[in-house]
Amino acid sequence: MSDNDFDDVNCDEYEYESFLDNEYNQDAPDAPQDPVISEEDDNSEKENLSQSRRISPAWNYFNDRTSQYPGRPVCCRCQKVFGKDTGISTLKRHLSSAHKITIENVKHTLKTQSVLNFKRIDPWPEKEKSERDNAVVEWIIGDAQPFRTVENLQFRQMVNTFDSRYQVPDKNGIKNLVIDYFEAKRDNIQYDLNNIPGKISLTTDIWTSTFNNDAYLGLTIHFIDNDWNLRNFLLDIMSFTTRHTGGNIADAIISTLKEFHIFEKTLALTSDNESAMVVCGRIIAAELAYELDNQSFRHYRCSAHILNLAAQQGIKIIDNEIAATDPSIGNLMPDAEGWTKIKDTLILLEPLEKATVLLSASSYPTISDIRFLFLGIQQHLDDYVRKEGFSQSRVASSILEKIKKYWEVVDSSTTVATILDPRTKLTLYATGEESTNAVNAIKSHFTEYNVSPPPAMLSNTNQETISNREYFHQLKRRRLDVLGSQTERSERRSRSTGIHEELDRYLALPCDDNVEPLLWWKAHFREFPALGAMARDYLSIQATSVPCEQAFSVASNTITRTRNRLLPETARALLCSKSWLEKGIGTIVRTRSELSPSLTESGPSMYQDQQVLGL
């Protein structure tokens, strides 16, 4: 049979169906069949046919395994037969011209060199390694992981899977990095403290680990920022090896406050009712009055602790009744009268539990709620003391007695915050003498928000070296300062009158029990600037010492039975860093000129650099 005898040539049925399944352009119209021609000898287009057949998609349209023309390409569309050495380019041109089928050129892929993707194991440069170290450090701190975690085989394999170039430090290395992280953050905190617009409040407490008997003094700081958000963080948690006396506690707190240059900003300290803490509060108040003439500082007793003491006193009566009845009664089911007493006891304690929850928060103002909640509790207890047939009237009377004992101390300290709360103002004070005394209490603080700096005194430094004329220049400046102070005092009296009018306008506005106090003051700060400044200071005071106790809860999860050999300084670094990390404190280093003058005069420090914190 000649090359032109193509009418009898058919693709194998199976191969043709395979071709239809893989055809690129099935919808393309069929062109008229080319006339049958003999084998083409186009030596200039000869290619490596065997290699092209393995790669080119053109072979989806040709069959070179027919029984009639073995080894010769036969078009499955028009049965045209080509020579054995026909190049792939010729076959493509046939498909394009005869059948409008375009085949992409894949010749370039034959010349492309393969790329081998081997995992790099060379260590990262110092900067990139520090970034990864910092990420591990923050995970160790934030998740309270033990240092030995970084030596766990599975942990290292996991990290190597993620990043084969990162070499995880050992437990001693990660410990040193945590200490460095803490020290860098601690230095950076000064910038955050300098940006506090008003005064600060503190909570404090002492905690002793049950695993190693190490004692710690905790100190949390609370303030309202420029955007009227109540913020807080753990300022410090110090190893406390001395006796737990009021003097030693006060010395440690004052030292920390002076170190951070915020002693003069301190307005309040909230703690439990231990006698040592009460003495501590008196010492700090005396020190502020002596050094800075600060008469505003007050020590606040933890309201939750007061409620707890009152509840315990009432429950003690129940315990005594049970013990007097029958020592073995605890093993018996209560009778009907017993269930009634249990029910009445729960009724008495319900408002105490609710008040404790409300006052223990640290994300919203609580000091202004003390009077509101305590008056409600006292009314609740008094009602049941007087209620006939109430089974636990003695318990109610005992709880009420304890609360009233502490209320005499707590009441006066909450007046300013209560009036500056737009939800209450004077509504919690009886009309007449009680309201008048409350208004006078807040007016007594007006002058503290209109104090001018004292007049400059004649300098005695290097007096022998200054010229006579300079000496009289100093006298001149002093005389002008005195005249200016007299003018300022006159202006202050005028402003004081304006502040009284500001208070009158504020009190004339209706109370809104559904408003959030800080949002209200954010909206009205320009309308009441002096009262707003007072509100920013006094609404930051904490009603309880719960924030400090929460820090100790974290400490109990850090100093555990398996980590009881943790050094106090290492525990301090972990606990403080965790709080600062979660609160976003101490993350940015600022130049020394942005810090307080007293700090910039202390000599070189890390503040000379301006950078984002990184180890």
Image: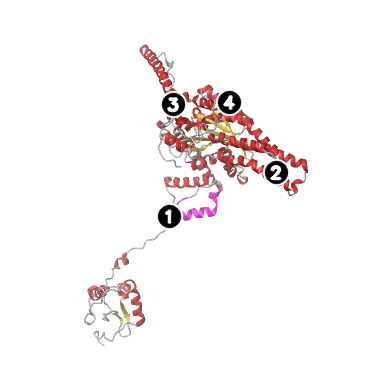
> Mark 4 to mark 2: distance in Å?
45 Å
For marks 3 and 1, the one nearer the N-term is 1
Q: Position of residue 569 (x, y in %)?
A: 56, 38
The residue labelled by disc 3 is 501
| 151 vs 470, nearest the viewer | 470
Instruction: Tell me which amino acid carries mark 2.
Output: Lys
The label shown at residue 167 is none
For marks 1 and 2, the one nearer the N-term is 1
Is 159 part of what is drawn in magenta? yes
Query: Contact, CB < 8 Å: mark 1 with mark 2?
Result: no
The residue labelled by disc 1 is 120
| 450 vs 557, nearest the viewer | 450
Q: Which residues are magenta?
A: 149-166
Instruction: Tell me which amino acid carries mark 4.
Output: Ile
| 474 vs 318, nearest the viewer | 318
How many residues crowd around disc 4 within 10 Å: few (fewer than 14), some, or many (20 or more)?
A: some
Q: Assign the N terminus to one quadrant of the image.
A: bottom left
Of marks 4 and 2, the one in the foreground: 2
